[in-house]
Image (cartoon, helix red, strand yellow):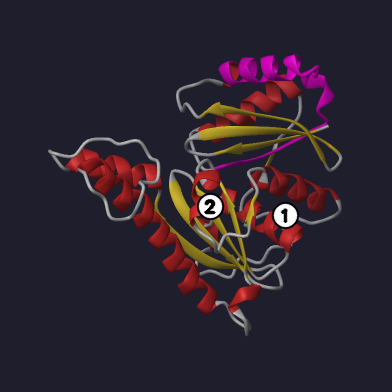
Amino acid sequence: MLLAIDISNTNIKFGLYNSEALKHHWTVSTVRQRTADEYAMLLGTLMNHSGHAFGDVHAVIFSCVVPPLTPVFQELVQRYFHQEAIIVDHTLDLGLHLLVDNPWEVGSDRIVTAIAAHELYGGPAIVISFSTAATFDVISAQGDFLGGAIAPGLMISAEALSNAAARLFRVELTPPRSALGKNTTENMQSGIIYGHVGLVQGLIHRLRAEIPQVSDQNEVKIIAHGGLANFMAPLIPEIQYVNQFLPLEGLRIAYERLRNGYRQRER
């Protein structure tokens, strides 16, 4: 079986694949201070609960946007799975051309979701991650990564507002009854939530217009994932697909491409 691991700033997602089928998946909180042993015990318990052991895994691939955790998970795979992990970065030849100024700056999470989006839905496409940050990744019809945008996430915006303004407080992140708030709570909910909706819709509009060789902007697929995707998608009619397993699917596809002969590029 293949173990795919998506390490982000907020959560770490594990996916256990049998060929193309995602058999089990688990999510734990990202804690930078945890050791390889601690993560191994967490993962081992989750796998055991599902009837599996470390020995059932023949390969491990992961993407990581938390640099201190890369060596932690390398050690985990070496000590408990007795193999070397495949670590996704810009040097791997995965059939994805990074058409940006500095390819080494592109996060591995954006690489795997771009691969998955084009493989599963086709291009051109815009992939939106509703997580700690709101990231927008633009993929051409040919499957090239063209660039994108990064904005503060919904939770960051809400926390910044309550922390910076002395008379404002934290509010429940639920859509108010209307954009026209009638009290402080509704005013804040409207500004935070519908303000984020406007940000997303504005960037979708601008990014769609800048994708080369697109005659009809409606042909651009809009795909969402991340912890707040299910919350935001109903508020943004432009979003056509929500796939919470997009990073794990991208890792699976990346592994298959490497196994079938893609080579690591020279650094």
Q: In this image, 159 relative to 167: left or right?
A: right
Badge 1 vs badge 2, beta-carbon distance below 8 Å? no
The x and y percentages for residue 69 are: 52, 32
Above or below, 260 relative to 50: below
Write the residue at 50% across / 45% down.
Answer: 231
Q: Is residue 43 part of the magenta span, yes or no?
A: yes
Q: Quadrant of residue 104?
A: bottom right
Above or below, 201 relative to 244: below
Q: Residues within 10 Å of mark 1 (few under 14, many from 20)?
A: few
Q: Quadrant of residue 71?
A: top right
| SS type, badge 2 | helix
The x and y percentages for residue 190 are: 32, 51
The x and y percentages for residue 244 are: 63, 43
Q: Nearer the viewer, residue 87 or 107?
A: 107
Q: Which residue is mark 1?
A: 264
Q: On residue 234, which mark appears?
A: 2
Q: In this image, 149 relative to 143: left or right?
A: left
| Region of the chain picked out in magenta, as a range | 38-64
| SS type, badge 1 | loop
Q: In this image, 53 relative to 245: left or right?
A: right
Q: Amino acid at mark 1?
A: Gln
Q: Is residue 29 part of the magenta span, yes or no?
A: no
In which quadrant of the rendered image does the C terminus lie? Answer: bottom right
